[in-house]
Amino acid sequence: MAFLDRIGLAGATDVENLARRNALLLSGAQAFGGSAAPIAIAMGGLAGFYLLGADKSLATAPVTGFNLGVAVGALPAAWLMRQVGRRYGFLSGMAMTAFGGIVSAIALFRHEFWLFALGMAFIGIGGSFVQQYRFAAADGSPTNFKSQAISWVLAGGVFAAIIGPQTVIFTRELFAPVMFAGSFVALVPLALITMSIIWFLRIPNDTRPGEAGHDETPARPLLEIISQPRFITAMICGVGSYSLMVFMMTGAPLAMVGCGFSPELATLGIQWHVMAMFAPSFFTGKLIARFGRDTITAAGLVILLGCAVVAHMGIELWNFWLALVLLGVGWNFGFIGATTMVTMTYRPSEKNKVQGFHDVTLFGIVAFSSLMSGKVLNAWGWDALNSLFWPVALFCLLALGVQILWERHRLA
């Protein structure tokens, strides 16, 4: 009973109990299915560097392929889940992740750079379904539990931060002398574990069109929904937070190796970063409930600026690792705050198309950010990469400030 009290199940209604149960299951799925992302990002740039010849400027292109896969897969993922339900959609996504891992491993054995990038794109398509876990938890929750449901799901990323990098460390040389192939083969058992967890999901109103219980409330046109000032502000802050995070996270392993640190230290840096991305999720929802979405989103953007300051201070190991930790915390506050804003702007009947549009836009820009990370790092260096944090974060803060003032004026 004490444990039930801590997670809020004791004395809760059936709806609240089901919402918490699903959030816990999705958190577990995030732990194993979400570990594909740190594996792909930690190894994508290094494997690309390994596969390329003299010109290394495209080393991060496979990571861009991963992010493009997330972007391209967002709308098909939303459509598929509308047709067959979220549970079967999530199972399909994990099958795609496993397939992408196999293609990537084959590409490394054949030493084919663009086939490797294609395999990474398939992993990204699987990742587009993982990105829907947070929406699935929120949509099945009462209003007062939405931000906490998102936080619970993302908290599973703490374990993904351990599982992913540790998988890389133990499997990177499994098929030596073909480096990194073992890490991508390992995505298959991770996907199977995730699928076994997802099987137990029971999301309310997760029905097909025409079935009993399906939400038939008239949906507004997409343009009307996305033109709401609150939605626009949420998109700006969410895209800004995520793009800055990927921009530095993609370039950091290459910069660390370029400064003389080992791939193992670079991988551990990514592990600390991913843990910092998700560890605050244990309390971010409560902070949002207490201080508000806008305040926590703004705090995240300020922390991202602090990350840039630390990165500018030097190229010692502590500079890289502390910057990556601040990068993760800033992303967590900024992105969870922005995601919570988005969930307040649409009706249940509008969720699939709005979430699909949101993630296509988000991950399309994130993919461009990851590609530019390698090019900026190769052309102008680590300091130039960090300098770009300032205009983006300050623009997001300005947009959020304008939104807050506009809403106060409207209510006055």
Image (tube, rainbow, N blue to C red):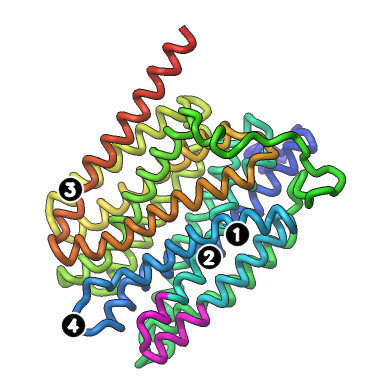
55 lies above or below 298: below
Kindly identify the amino acid type of the residue bearing the numbered disc 3.
Ser
Q: Mark 2 and mark 4: span between their CA atoms?
A: 30 Å
Pointer 3 or 2: first along the chain = 2
Which residue is pictured at 35% across the width and 44% down the height? 240
Residues shaded magenta = 101-117
Kindly identify the amino acid type of the residue bearing the numbered disc 1.
Pro
How far across and how far down the image is residue 163, in percent?
A: 48, 66
Give the foreground label among 1 and 4: 1
Give the foreground label among 3 and 1: 1
Which residue is label 1 attached to? 76
Which residue is pictured at 35% across the width and 33% down the height? 299
Label 4, secondary structure: give it: loop
Give the foreground label among 3 and 4: 4
Q: Residues within 10 Å of mark 4 (few under 14, many from 20)?
A: few
How far across and how far down the image is residue 119, in percent?
A: 47, 76
Count of numbered marks:
4
Q: Quadrant of the N terminus?
A: top right
**Which quarter of the figure has residue 315?**
bottom left
- As drawn, the label of residue 387 is 3
Q: Mark 2 and mark 1: span between their CA atoms?
A: 9 Å
- Horizontally, residue 273 falls left or right of residue 140, namely left
Q: Residues within 10 Å of mark 3 (few under 14, many from 20)?
A: some
Which residue is pictured at 68% across the width and 33% down the height? 142
- Horizontally, residue 410 falls left or right of residue 112, namely right
**Which quarter of the figure has residue 306?**
top left
Residue 407, magenta (yes or no) = no
Which residue is pictured at 42% across the width and 11% down the height? 409
Pointer 3 or 4: first along the chain = 4
